[in-house]
Amino acid sequence: MQTPQPRPFFLDPRQCCDFPDVATALTDPDGLLAIGGDLSTARLLAAYRQGIFPWYSAGQPILWWSPNPRAVLFLDALKISRSLHKTLRREHFNLRFDSAFDQVINACASSRKDQRGTWITQAMRHAYQRLHQEGYAHSVEVWQDNHLVGGLYGISLGKLFFGESMFSRQTDASKVALVYLVKQLQRWQFALIDCQVQSAHLTSLGAVCLTREQFIENVTIFTQPPTLQGRWTMDPDIAQELVML
């Protein structure tokens, strides 16, 4: 007799944090766990603290996922290629945190219309903008001649950063954003960045895959410390540190 496959859990929008155990997610690598609910700040934070994130396209119900395996970047494992070293040494980009969050998330949505990024719907943008206003969501911005040419955004809880999306309008711009983020997070004694689903791009930067169980162990440990909430500011000497690499 075949073992019955698990089915996604249907969330009651009247219940704030009623996620099932991630072990009940579907057995395919994407790991669909639950359907429905809402994108309130309380529900989103509860989801991230359990290793769950929303991802769905316009016209679909809200879908919640817990992939197995899970892509992560341990901060001390970041790989900087020779070409990226050259880009960093040229110092033709300016980096900032949290000065243009709305522009970054809109750029991530518009630059991924034919890719997996179609999940950045208007409702998702509004939800993460609220998280930014409450000091949980952050952007890293790459500027050139006062133009936003790359960046990324994600959620911070404890000593863990949950990366959501990145975009690039200039060669290496999104990679530069990630390098600066890693260097700053190291100073704040963060442990890792959640990259969600592995790709060749992430592998080239040093991301590795953990089993869902391993990932949840890390989430349980590293979301316990106090969260560095509020607007982030980058240490001004990081650029000089990277030039000297």
Image (tube, helix red, strand yellow):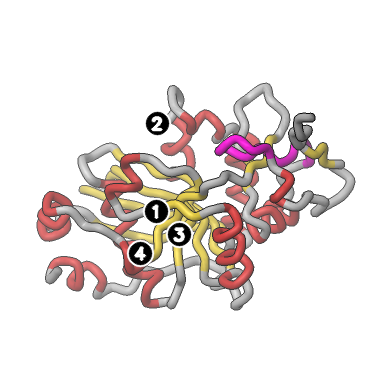
Task: Quickly name the residue at label 4.
Answer: 182
What residue type is disc 4 on? Answer: Val
Give the mark nearer the N terminus: 4 vs 2.
2
Location of mark 1 (residue): 208
| Residue 105 in picture, x, y percent from top left | 48, 43
Q: CA distance from mark 1 to mark 3?
A: 11 Å
Image spot of residue 39 (x, y percent): 71, 44
The residue at the point 23 percent across, 45 percent down is 172
Depicted 122 relative to depicted 164: above or below: above
Regarding residue 125, the answer to whether it shows in the image is yes
Q: Residue furthest front?
A: 1
Q: Earlier in the sequence, mark 3 or mark 4?
A: 4
Q: Report which residue position mark 3 lands on.
A: 193
Direction from residue 194 to residue 147 in the image, left or right: left
Q: Which residues are magenta?
A: 26-37
Would residue 109 appear left or right of 4 to someone viewing this image?
left
What amino acid is at disc 2? Ser
Crowding at dot 3, Cα within 10 Å, few <14 / some 14-19 / many 20+, comes out as many
- Which residue is painted at 68% across and 37% down in the image? 26
The answer to whether marks 1 and 2 mark residues whose Cβ atoms lie closer than 8 Å is no
Cα distance between the residues tagged 1 and 2: 25 Å
Magenta highlight on residue 146: no
Identify residue for label 2: 111
Which residue is most to the right?
14
Dot 4: element: helix
State which tag comes first along the sequence, 1 or 2. Answer: 2
Q: Tag on residue 157? A: none
Q: Secondary structure at mark 2?
A: loop
